[in-house]
Image (cartoon, rainbow, N blue to C red):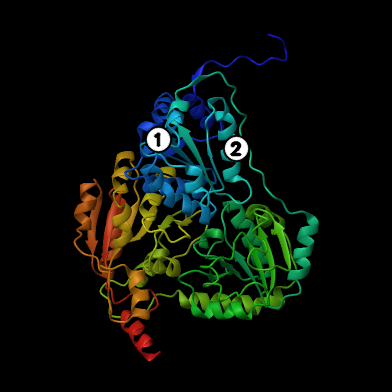
Amino acid sequence: MTPFETPRPPPRTAGQVLVDQLLIHGADRAFCVPGESYLEVLDALHDVQDRFTLINARHEAGAANMAEAYGKLTGKPGICMVTRGPGACHAAIGVHIAQQDSTPMILLVGQIGRNMTDREAFQEVDYRQMFGGLAKWVAQIDCPERVPEYIARAFRMATSGRPGPVILALPEDMLTTLVEVADARPYFATKARLGADEIARVADLLATAQKPLLLLGGSGWTDEAAADIQRFAETNRLPVTTSFRRQDSISNRSDAYVGEFGTATAPLLRQRLTEADLLLVIGARLGEMTTNGYENLVPPELRQKLIHIHPDPDEIGRVYGPDIGFAATAPEAAAALATLDLGRQNIWGDWAGGLRQEWLNDTESPADGGWALDMGQALCALRDALPEDVIVTLDAGNHTGWAQRFLRFGRPGREIGSTCGAMGYSVPAAVAASLTHPERLTLAMVGDGGFMMSGQELATATQYGATPVVLLFNNGIYGTIRMHQEREHPERVSGTRLAGHDFVKMAEGYGCYAERVTTTAEFADALARARASGRAALLELVTDPEQISSRTTITRLRANAKAR
């Protein structure tokens, strides 16, 4: 062998090569439902159990949601493995969440043998067509020698620019082929950066504002980035808001924080948005949920001046034309702004202080409305006693309004929720969070409808020793849909009732601690018992359907509808 030759690698199956690449790129965990179409990968993982943990979920949607939540928590691609056809279809919701939430994720899908393609073989699907609009990149590895190339590209694509999901289809006969191929080198993500000239332009335009507003969102925020942006905001008395379910981008206990634009936004904050004369947006896409259906910010040209910083240059100007737009990640932007002092504290102080006080007023414990169990009062009594590093996972539905309105988020704690409104997300996300950070308290917020879509993942928690505490809001209805139903068609209830569940028995059957809570006074002690149990736990919170959200009731909705 000459000095310029590399040692010839030993023969390996393509499945073994794939697993070796996962390890090279720093992956140490995957979530799956097993299938015969990728047996060779499962077999290769058997030999690396000391370095790689495989979590088998109860449903492919649960596995995909776990991988997506892992990606949110770590910034590394969450790895999900599913079988062909139905398995991939079930996992599609997790891919959709990762796309809309800008979460790094890699979905590995077993595929039919290459010699059966285009015959509509058993469970055959063309994944390029199926996932084409849902992912950053979709490919099929037909050549086993190219496995290192494809896996390296998948990691790079999932994490570069605006993060997102990547799908690779793995023909089962390809995985069993013996090859002699060199490994790829560890990947690195390509990141856009801000230079001194760009920061100077941001500072110059920002300094002209009388009532500026900083809006944070998107993915990729680290603890350090959250601290950097907080330093910048506090130094300059710049009020900070966050986009939908990104409240942990800055400590809510900071005097700079003034609220979230999402489903639990205070009406007064939406009014203040119209009064602002400049928006500095970092990381957020300015999507439908954050802009209240594009009504609070009407495209394409805003009345306010707009500075938009986002990792994907194609996102800047996509809906709203900015005065200044730069491609950069949230950590890069936060680091560049951290020490900037614009000398505008006296000018912006009253504006920022007023917004802060309005948010504090809106998040005070609500007055006694006569509800047996008032989760607003319960969460307000709880919030100051929660650990600083608590992880809160959110499902879809009106019940999340109580957490989003009354809890306090920020680093090192985390708010983990789907911004695309997927039901069934919170429980598997909480399982993944508890497995990723077993030393921390994980609280899952979920409604009775959402729990019935993924509650079986509590069995996964029990199997692997995860200890999330699930707060199940049970009002016997699909609450969000019922709210819209009463608003548009009052007293014409159709398809939104739920019944026939004993959630305590279900949870106990999965090996969890469980109890039912029916009054506000019972809540704190029940939560303490759940946390002390040392097991995955569920508290069934029996709430009144009349209290349809944290801001209104069914009776009020009907009255407003009839008055129109």
Q: Earlier in the sequence, mark 1 or mark 2?
A: 1
Q: How many marks?
A: 2
Question: Looking at the rendering, in which quadrant would you find the C terminus?
Answer: bottom left
Position of residue 519 measured from the top left corner of the image (x, y, whole percent): 25, 70
Q: Residue under label 2, please give it.
A: 153
* Residue furthest bottom in the image: 563
Q: Nearer the viewer, residue 496 or 281?
A: 496
Relative placement, left or right, of 441 versus 295 is: left
Residue 149: name its quadrant. top right
Amino acid tagged 2: Arg
Q: Amino acid at mark 1?
A: Leu
Q: Are circles 1 and 2 on residues that touch, CB within 8 Å?
A: no
Give the percent coordinates (x, y) of residue 17.
51, 25
Q: Nearer the viewer, mark 1 or mark 2?
A: 2
Res. 185 image quadrant: top right
Mark 2 crowd level (few <14, some 14–19, many ≥20, 10 Å Cα): some
Q: Quick one: which residue is furthest to the front in this view?
A: 119
Instruction: Provide the residue designation for mark 1.
Output: 54
Q: Which element is circle 1 on?
A: strand
Please state which of residues 300 and 379 is positioned toward the viewer in this rendering.
300
Identify whether 87 is placed above or below 451: above
Point out the residue furthest to the top here.
1
Quarter of the figure with the N terminus: top right
Task: For mark 2, give the secondary structure.
Answer: helix
Q: Residue at x 21, y 56 (%)?
A: 504
**What residue is drawn where x is 69% and y is 58%?**
338
